[in-house]
Image: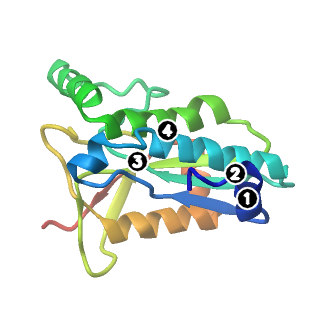
Amino acid sequence: MLDLDPATMARHVAGCTAVASCLGHGMSLRGIYGQPRRLVADAVRRLCEAVMANAPGRPVRFVLMNTAGNSNRDLREPLSLAQRAVVALVRALVPPHADNEAAADYLRVVVGQAHPAIEWAVVRPDSLVDRDAVSGYEAYPSPVRSAIFDAGRTSRINVAHFMAELALGGAAWERWRGRMPVIYDTVAG
């Protein structure tokens, strides 16, 4: 994706009403420490630039999958000193975390709340697990548990379901547009 030229990227998103990004780094040494270090942030920036280049008549919905370990700095989410210390270490030692923060910050700060071409939501799941079917889940404006010391679980299929609901617009989009909801499964296991 990062190898596509801007005109090709713009053609790919032309006519889209929504863009969903679930890009991430592979869970291997090469995936975590290899190139590209800014895969998610660069992809978000390039996709947004492609949308902007098309000058759509209505804002395109951009839905980004991120992580519950990324705080929403617009809300100044409270973190314990211990959690802040662990997140700082993770940010310094695990490049994908800083990449996820930069991607969300691009939407939050650069695109902002009133962009004429792009509206956004950043979905922050906690501890991804596999399930065979959509189950109960809830979304919150901020974490209701510590992503480091009391992580919840979120199934990948529930994340996909929630992101699809957002991409379609409607009530879910109206509630979460311009926000960074944290999603947790309500089913134990």
Tell me the kind of residue under disc 4.
Answer: Ala
Quarter of the image that includes the N terminus: bottom right
The residue beneath circle 2 is 5
The residue beneath circle 3 is 66
Residue 91: percent from the left, percent from the top?
Answer: 29, 29
* Label located before the other in sequence (3 or 1): 1
* Label located before the other in sequence (2 or 4): 2
Residue 30: percent from the left, percent from the top?
Answer: 27, 48
The reply, left or right, for residue 109 in relation to residue 88 is right
Alpha-carbon span between mark 3 and mark 4: 7 Å
* Label located before the other in sequence (3 or 4): 3
Alpha-carbon span between mark 1 and mark 4: 24 Å
Q: Which residue occupies the foreground of this view, 189 or 10? A: 10
Residue 114: percent from the left, percent from the top?
Answer: 73, 36
Tell me the kind of residue under disc 3.
Answer: Asn
Look at the numbered discs 3 and 4 and tell me whether their residues touch, using CB distance below 8 Å.
yes
Q: Which mark is residue 172?
A: none
Look at the numbered discs 1 and 2 and tell me whether their residues touch, using CB distance below 8 Å.
yes
* Label located before the other in sequence (2 or 3): 2
Task: Note whether residue 40 is visible.
Answer: yes
Query: Which mark lies nearer to you, 1 or 4?
Result: 1
Q: Residue 104 carries which label?
A: 4
**Residue for point 53% across, 67% down:** 165
Query: Which mark lies nearer to you, 2 or 4?
Result: 2
Tell me the kind of residue under disc 2.
Answer: Asp
